[in-house]
Amino acid sequence: MEILRFDTRAEFQRQQRAVLERAQASLALFDPDFSLFVLGEPDADAILRRFLRGGGTLRLVMHDPRHIERNWPRFLRLLREHGHRIECRVTNRGIRQLTDSFCIADGVHLVRRFHSDHLRGEAAFDAPQETEVPRERFAAIWEESQPGLHATVTGL
């Protein structure tokens, strides 16, 4: 088990990439708007394409999809091309006060910020015990959400 703490945008994004690269079967992500995530970047797109071609599944939950719709054409293209392996949901009003942010890979790797307005957080690798609470939290958030980001969004 390896736990690394961070408090800068660059380190947060570096840890995101490390978690994405380790994913083989599943990725579960929650963030209010994903504005600090790397999912729209060319290198992350390549990582996700390899992951999805290998049979992986990607699930995202957010409060507001506008950042993705307006700024991530690569991710929208990925959603269009691999929609059978990607599901995006938007939270219901009742849980829009949630402010943490996390990405879980295969139930054993995790990167999380304790509050989405701040960069302080941690990454845990090969640490299923560290992902237990976030996995349960993701499942609960998923249940309180509905489909909300679709590949047909043009961002205009």
Image: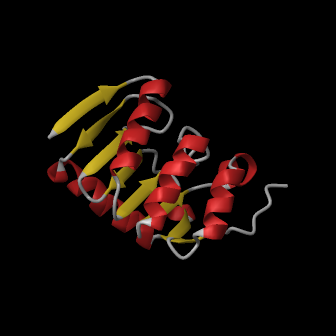
Answer left or right for 125 relative to 76: left
Q: From what the image shows, is residue 80 above or below residue 112?
A: below
Residue 8 visible to the viewer: yes
Percent across and percent down for residue 148 are 62, 68
Q: Could you tell me which residue is drawn at 53 percent across and 42 percent down?
A: 37
Residue 148 visible to the viewer: no
Q: How is the image coloured?
A: secondary structure
**Camera-side residue: 119 or 12?**
12
**Camera-side residue: 98 or 3?**
3
Answer left or right for 63 relative to 3: right
- Asked which quadrant contains residue 26, the reply is bottom left
Percent across and percent down for residue 4 are 26, 30
Percent across and percent down for residue 7 are 39, 23
- Asked which quadrant contains residue 106, the reply is bottom left
Q: Could you tell me which residue is drawn at 37 percent across and 38 percent down?
A: 114
Percent across and percent down for residue 36 are 55, 37
Which quadrant of the rendered structure holds the C terminus? bottom right
Q: Could you tell me which residue is drawn at 62 percent across and 65 percent down?
A: 79
Which quadrant of the rendered structure holds the N terminus? top left
